[in-house]
Amino acid sequence: MPIKVLMPALSPTMTEGKLAKWLVKEGDTVESGDVMAEIETDKATMEVEAVDEGTLGKILVAEGTDNVAVNSVIAMLLEEGEDASALEGADTSDAAPPPAAEEPNEAAPAPEKKAEPAPTPASPPPAAAPAASSGGGRIFASPLAKRLAKMEGLDLGQISGSGPHGRIVKRDIEQALASGTGKAAPAAAPTAAGEAAAVPPAGIDEGMLGLLPEYEAVPNTGMRKTIAKRLTASARDIPHFNVTADIEIDKLLGLRKELNGREGADYKISVNDFVIKAVALALKRQPDCNVAYTDDAILKFNRADISMAVAVDGGLITPIIKDAGSKGLAKISEEAKELAGKARDGKLQPQEYQGGTFSISNLGMFGVKSFNSIINAPQGGILSVGAGEQRAVVKDGALAVATLMSVTLAVDHRCIDGATAAAFVKELKGILEDPLQLML
């Protein structure tokens, strides 16, 4: 019988993803280990390998489809000796219902209905038999059924499912089309050219709608939703404590110039590479800052895995320089460039951005003097690095000019005390102002 090809879970937290591209087509022979498709998660694009062998009989989820739930059936493989007729009547329903907490709310009523005259509460209009849901208004339907319903303009909330657990499958859509049921109400047209929708986007007061200029609603990507969710939780739940210091980096810049100018040098060390190495060394000297808070215990890490914030299209990601304290500047520079490139291309593997014990966010290249970062939970601290700039300073009672770089450490005050944070910043300042310590 045909073999189901399921949407894989490419990370422990993945619940859905985008089927970005098929690398095989219907009729192709597939062997175990062959790369079949590219899947976009909220962090990266990854290749999916076949776990069975056979002939690709039918693609059920077209490339470019968003919000494909983990364990959804995305294709069917024909075993040896089978032909396309074996697909007729084959069960293409999902292996398991998608996680209710993450599935898009496709059963929600269309927003424009709020602008229509509502019936009196005592006489609600009769509703069609509801499809199986998770209890929160979310509908269980296979990706193929969702796609067909969208193409035909059907309201899944008016269709009863006949698949496992009451899930709506292809045959339910076909029956709805044949009987003429499930047609969604047409969307209300704007009252004037260029006028905004009658109901404002969530988070905007309806009374403000008429005061807004014309706008374009750009749907949030999976990455943007994840960033919003995690940073909101961090800012809300973690008591941030900030410590700022100015660090003189003239010696560091001189050492950098000397190292990069060496004959035969095949590397170009950046200031950020020095900062990564210095942070790892400072964490070794102040291990109480290399920690994470849990309800039961404070986790103290035995090595410094440094997460570095990298801006990518639509958001940011934090690839990790693992055990940075044991690596030289040239190795850190090489890894940082490689990881940043993979991050911008969406090619990071989960083990390259999940984890980390401490983060660094550097906006110095934008001329930013100083800023405060939000902690990358569950880590205990993050260092914000500003631009190095020449400023007037007083040395031995006389006015002088020095290159200063402002840094701000944000720590989780539940596991890192103020004095501990200050001691770490003092240690980091001493290392960067005397960078020969990094050579030891």
Image (cartoon, rainbow, N blue to C red):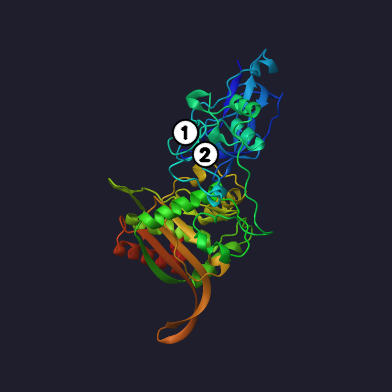
Placement of 365 over or under 124, stated as above or below? below
**Label ID, residue 107:** 2
Placement of 156 over or under 119, stated as above or below? above
Secondary structure of the residue carrying numbered label 1: loop
**Label ID, residue 133:** 1
Secondary structure of the residue carrying numbered label 2: loop
Q: Residue at x 56, y 32 (%)?
A: 7
440 left or right of 141 in image: left
Q: Nearer the viewer, residue 116 or 55?
A: 116
Placement of 259 over or under 26, stated as above or below? below
Indicate the position of residue 209 as horizontal and vertical percent values: 55, 62
State the quadrant of the C terminus: bottom left
Q: Amino acid at mark 1?
A: Ser
Q: CA distance from mark 2 to mark 1?
A: 9 Å
Question: Residue 246 is drawn in which quadrant?
Answer: bottom left
Indicate the position of residue 49 as horizontal and vertical percent values: 60, 30
* Farthest residue, direction left: 296
Q: Amino acid at mark 2?
A: Ala
Q: Nearer the viewer, residue 92 or 360?
A: 92
Indicate the position of residue 212 as horizontal and vertical percent values: 58, 65
Q: Residue at x 59, y 50 (%)?
A: 219
Q: Nearer the viewer, residue 130 or 147?
A: 130
Tag 2 and tag 1, C-beta contact below 8 Å: yes
Check disc 2: other Cα within 10 Å, few if <14, some if 14-19, many if 20+.
Answer: some
Q: Nearer the viewer, residue 99 or 322?
A: 99
Indicate the position of residue 15 as horizontal and vertical percent values: 49, 38
